[in-house]
Image (cartoon, rainbow, N blue to C red):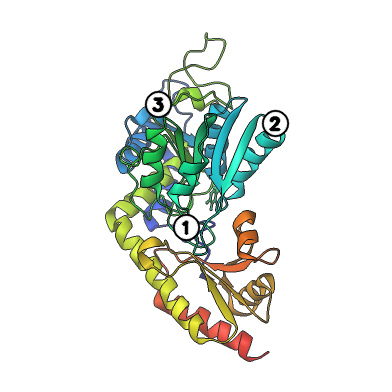
Amino acid sequence: MTYLDNAATSFPKPEGVYEALDRFARHSLANPGRSGHKMALESEHALTDARHRLNRFFAGRNPDRWAFTLNGTDALNMAFKGVLNPGDHVITTDLEHNSVSRPLVALAEAKRISLTRIPADSGGTIDPDAIRKAITSQTKLIALTHASNVLGTVQPVEEVGRIARERDLIFLVDAAQSAGVLPIDVQACCIDLLAMPGHKSLLGPTGTGALYVGPRVNLRPWREGGTGGDSLTPTQPTDFPFHLEGGTPNVLGVTGLVAGLDFVESRGVDAIRKHEVELCDKLRAALSELPGFEVFGHADTNRRVGVISFRCEILPAPELAGLLDQSFDIAVRPGLHCAPYIHKALGTAPDGLVRVSPGPFNTQTDIDHLIDALKQITGGM
Ligand SMILES: Cc1ncc(COP(=O)(O)O)c(C=O)c1O
């Protein structure tokens, strides 16, 4: 199979991830921090080490301010539900994934918050000035995706972070499509809350994610329970990371995530992004020569990650992706990509687009195979 759906979940993982998962599952998979015996301590140590690694990689202030989550969605919910209060105003954008939009719209429909959604320009970028103009005296939070999961366009997080800090607002960045392919310095970008899955460009297994909580923010926990210590305290301990981590963490997945991070650090985010963007550009160039294809999102390679979406005049996206899968063994993602607002703005709902998202292990040959399949499908119609 030619797998080109890395924006959903990366595949394959680096060899080191499979090895780390196997080793840890066989030798160290005790309950972290619960029992005090050697294996439990080893398991706890794996989590602590992972927090240090993430903190260093994203230039955080304190390793303890990293909470492990089930995925990106879990991290985002933890952030929104932990920080927003009745009457707050939130600014977000029409590029957002439903993992940002749905919790915010649900709070707005319950009349607990008010919400302003900033439209992207026709190429898929948010203007920081439009965010500045939307700020009111009630604004508490700006929630922005770092890179669009539909168009791959990179958003101006540094500028928006500066605006948020000047106005003393909380700045949340959804790094689902950027963690592992774009450098992120949470302090330099004034990011207070950074939410990410571990199973996309960080190359970890599914069931992993993380939330960084900067020092200006104190979240209410949205999941309460056992933490292994402080058992006499009747409510959730207030010290991080236990404050946010009720229940046994996915320590096995986290060891895989760290092995994924090893790969990302050794190859380098710039090299990984360059490789993936080059593959997308090869496809973009080929599609521009083929009749009946339309590619979305601005073309500037410096402002994109390795995600490209297109449509075909004669075949709706779901059918085209179905043919690629069934007849050519090529995996891509059709539809709305859980990002309905940008598809509505582009006029591509309800069928959506075909999204192609290469990963670090894809090659030029994979893209040639895709181009050839598209030619065969459309040429035969
Ligand atoms: C931009 C964006 N945000 C959030 C998510 C949600 O991540 P997860 O599927 O890990 O919950 C995704 C997943 O595709 C995404 O692309």
Residue at 37% of width from left, 46% of height from top?
Answer: 159
Per the image, label 2 sits on a secondary structure element best described as loop
- Quarter of the image where one finds residue 311: bottom right
Of residue 89 and residue 14, the one placed in the foreground of this image is 89
Q: Mark 2 points at which residue?
A: 111
Residue 369, above or below 340: below
Q: Does the residue labelled 3 lie within 8 Å of ligand 1?
A: no
Q: Is residue 226 above or below residue 149?
A: above
Q: Mark 1 points at which residue?
A: 125
**Residue type pointed to by label 3:** Arg
Q: In which quarter of the image is the N terminus?
A: bottom right
Q: Position of residue 77 (x, y in %)?
A: 58, 36
Of the 4 image quadrants, the one containing the C terminus is bottom right
Local crowd size for mark 3, using a 10 Å CA cut-off: few (<14), some (14–19), many (≥20): few
Q: Residues within 10 Å of mark 1 (few under 14, many from 20)?
A: many
Question: Which mark is first along the chain, 3 or 2?
Answer: 2
Q: Position of residue 208 (x, y in %)?
A: 50, 43
Q: Residue at x 46, y 42 (%)?
A: 132
Please state the horizontal and vertical placement of residue 92, each as a whole percent of the image. 54, 44
Identify the residue at image location x=45%, y=32%.
Answer: 169
Identified by mark 1, the residue type is: Thr
Does ligand 1 reach within 8 Å of label 2's beta carbon? no
Q: How many labels does the image show?
A: 3
Q: Which of 308 and 24 is in front in this view?
A: 308
Image disc number at residue 216:
3
Q: How crowded is mark 2: few (under 14 residues within 10 Å), some or many (20 or more)?
A: few
| Side (left or right) of 185 relative to 110 | left
